[in-house]
Amino acid sequence: MKYKHIIRERIGDTEIVRIDNPPVNALHPDVADEILAVTCDVEDDHSVRSFVLTGTGRCFVAGGDIKLFTTLDRHGAAKMALTAQAMQHALYRLRVPVIAALNGHALGGGLELMMACDIAIAEEQAKIGLTEVRLGLIPGAGGTRMLGKLVAPGTAKRLLFTGEKMTAAYAAQIGLVDQVVPEGESLKAALALAETINGMGPLAVAAAKKSMIFGADHSLDEGHRREVDLFAALFDSEDHKEGLNAFLERRRANFKGR
């Protein structure tokens, strides 16, 4: 597949996607479709153990495509939002961990995209926020639901109601961003983290992600039961045996994903 709005790269076991839709990497539906296509490939390619999502230029994603907004009625708006939600749902449930490397601003749909990722690393100059109310709108790609799951309810409501643009440092303070790095260092930090994850048992990492997602959407008892099922299933894997042997032999494990 040829891509017009993203740049796709592979480094080792890590898939990298750079959003490239100048000047601000607006989240046009075509961008969402291309990211979705990559997630489908990654889901089926078990040689990939991590996924890094970043942007080109000075922005990660600085919102939706405002020019497109001016052409939409309510039906077109719903279609656009559902396209973005489908892409973000695929990222959220992707088999491998997804790391957002915020090379710059993540506003509106950009923050929604970041929240669909498992871990976010932001450069210190990045501004972050759900700014849709400034346009007389609300987030349409999952922002109202996801923000309330990631930060305290009162904080989420304040951010939604005011359209505040946070600093990266404040976003980290409230737990929305995992790490803040100097300007120009987000991709390097994301790749270093990805390399660490790649050295772990891939079946175990996938199971851990699956268990956390299931637990967030179900009751405590259901979540515990699912965790036990996933935990027990790993005892039949070659990776588990390799991990035990490596520990006992005091060497680094060579996990195969089997």
Image (cartoon, helix red, strand yellow):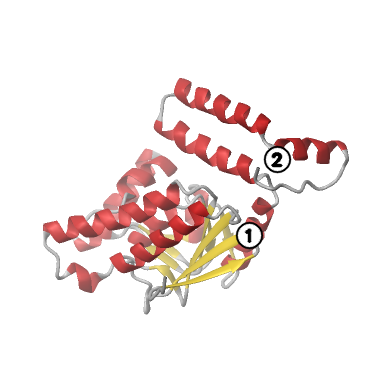
Residue at 29% across, 65% down: 29
- Please tell me whether residue 245 is drawn above or below residue 103 in the rendered image: above
SS category of the residue bearing label 2 = helix
- In the image, residue 160 above or below residue 103: above
Quadrant placement of the N terminus: bottom left
Q: Which mark is residue 4?
A: none
- Label 1: element kind: loop
**Residue positioned most to the top:** 221
Q: Nearer the viewer, residue 174 or 184?
A: 184
- Specify the quadrant that holds the C terminus: top right
Q: Residues within 10 Å of mark 2 (few under 14, many from 20)?
A: many
The crowd level at tag 1 (other Cα within 10 Å; few <14, some 14-19, many 20+) is some
Q: Is residue 238 above or below residue 231?
A: below
Residue 13 numbered mark, or none:
1
Q: Nearer the viewer, residue 172 or 33?
A: 33
> Residue 120: x and y, percent?
52, 55
State whether residue 51 appears in this view.
yes
Which residue lies at the image location 12% right of the left edge and 57% below the top edge? Answer: 74
Q: Earlier in the sequence, mark 1 or mark 2?
A: 1
Three-letter code, disc 2:
Asp
> Horizontal placement of 224 versus 80: left or right?
right
Which residue is found at the position 19% from the left and 55% from the top? Answer: 78
Query: Residue tagged by mark 2?
Result: 239
Q: Taking 41 as reference, is 153 above or below it?
A: above
Residue 119 screen position, x and y as percent = 53, 52
**Residue type, mark 1 in image:** Asp
Q: Quadrant of residue 64?
A: bottom left
